[in-house]
């Protein structure tokens, strides 16, 4: 029990980073690269958001790929909210783990989990990684599930939040996002007339009393004096 007046230790973002590195230390991805690089990249991509979301980003695969349990995370001081995000993005905890798109739709029902999944998706979709996978398995068709998931995830959160994540982890996807938004815009700009354009609300003004001058007339002055009529 902490001494009186001493604040209890709190599970911080830095603690999450260390735990992620240790928990995934011996794991490799499909390209035989250290898996900890992926989880750290996902957490880093969420730097613009609050601590619970960032912690969940670093630990988003800890329930999927390690023996770590919900109770163990709570006992360490991970918040209920962060644990809930981790559980929602953990595929093996879904009703049908083999149905990837159903899992994406489930994740997209929660704002915070969607942000974590967007970061995860973006890092897995880096051009260099996609190219390396294609070169390693040239006989396999390119994986499209990440691309298919993005419209569902992007639609679940504000666009500005999507952009913040992509700018940090995979700026190449920003162009894809812009193209997608252009396709969704069905405005006929060729035949758009002035009358069709959105108009600003008229600004209400107080009617002017036409009998009251806007400026008080200057006091009368003799010709030739300041303010008076010019001399002939």
Image (cartoon, rainbow, N blue to C red):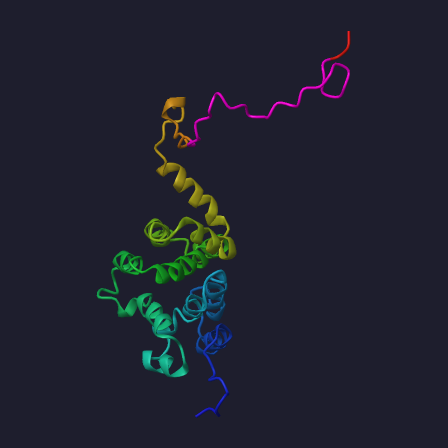
Question: Picture coordinates of residue 121 (x, y %)?
Answer: 40, 57
Q: Nearer the viewer, residue 29 or 208?
A: 208
Q: Nearer the viewer, residue 40 or 145?
A: 40
The C terminus lies in quadrant: top right
44 on left or right of 89: right
What is the quadrant of residue 206 in the picture?
Answer: top left
Say if 177 sits above or below 199 in the image: below
Question: Picture coordinates of residue 77 (x, y %)?
Answer: 41, 80
Q: Nearer the viewer, residue 11 or 226?
A: 226
Say if 92 sits above or below 201 in the image: below
Say if 187 sits above or below 166 in the image: above
**Residues drawn in magenta:** 203-229
Q: Count every numbered label the image shows and give the total.
A: 0
In magenta stretch: residue 138: no
Q: Nearer the viewer, residue 77 or 108?
A: 77
The N terminus lies in quadrant: bottom left
Q: Identify the residue at the far left of this view.
A: 95
- Considering the whole magenta stretch, tell me its main secondary structure: loop
Q: Identify the residue at the far top of this view.
A: 232
What is the quadrant of residue 229 in the picture?
Answer: top right
Q: Going 40% across and 26% down the picture, which residue do you hit?
A: 189
Question: Picture coordinates of residue 5 (x, y %)?
Answer: 50, 88
In magenta stretch: residue 228: yes
Say if 226 sits above or below 39 in the image: above
Question: Picture coordinates of residue 98 (x, y %)?
Answer: 25, 63
């Amino acid at each position: 029990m902490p001494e009186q007046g001493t604040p209890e230790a709190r599970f911080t973002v830095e603690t999450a980073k260390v735990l992620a590195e240790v928990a995934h230390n011996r794991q490799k991805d499909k390209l035989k690269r250290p898996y900890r690089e992926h989880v750290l990249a996902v957490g880093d991509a969420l730097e613009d958001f609050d601590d619970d979301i960032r912690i969940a980003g670093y630990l988003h695969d800890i329930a999927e790929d390690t023996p770590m349990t919900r109770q163990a995370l709570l006992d360490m001081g991970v918040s209920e909210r962060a644990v809930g995000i981790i559980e929602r993005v953990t595929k093996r905890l879904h009703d049908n783990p083999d149905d990837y798109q159903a899992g994406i739709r489930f994740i997209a029902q929660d704002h915070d989990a969607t942000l974590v999944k967007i970061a995860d998706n973006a890092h897995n979709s880096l051009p260099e990684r996609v190219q390396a996978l294609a070169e390693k398995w040239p006989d396999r068709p390119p994986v499209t599930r990440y691309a298919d998931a993005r419209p569902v995830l992007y639609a679940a959160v504000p666009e500005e939040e999507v952009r913040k994540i992509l700018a940090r982890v995979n700026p190449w996807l920003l162009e894809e996002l812009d193209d997608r938004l252009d396709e969704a815009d069905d405005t006929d700009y060729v035949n758009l007339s002035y009358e069709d354009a959105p108009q600003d609300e008229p600004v209400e003004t107080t009617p002017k009393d036409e009998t009251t001058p806007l400026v008080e007339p200057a006091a009368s002055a003799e010709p030739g004096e300041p303010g008076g009529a010019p001399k002939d």
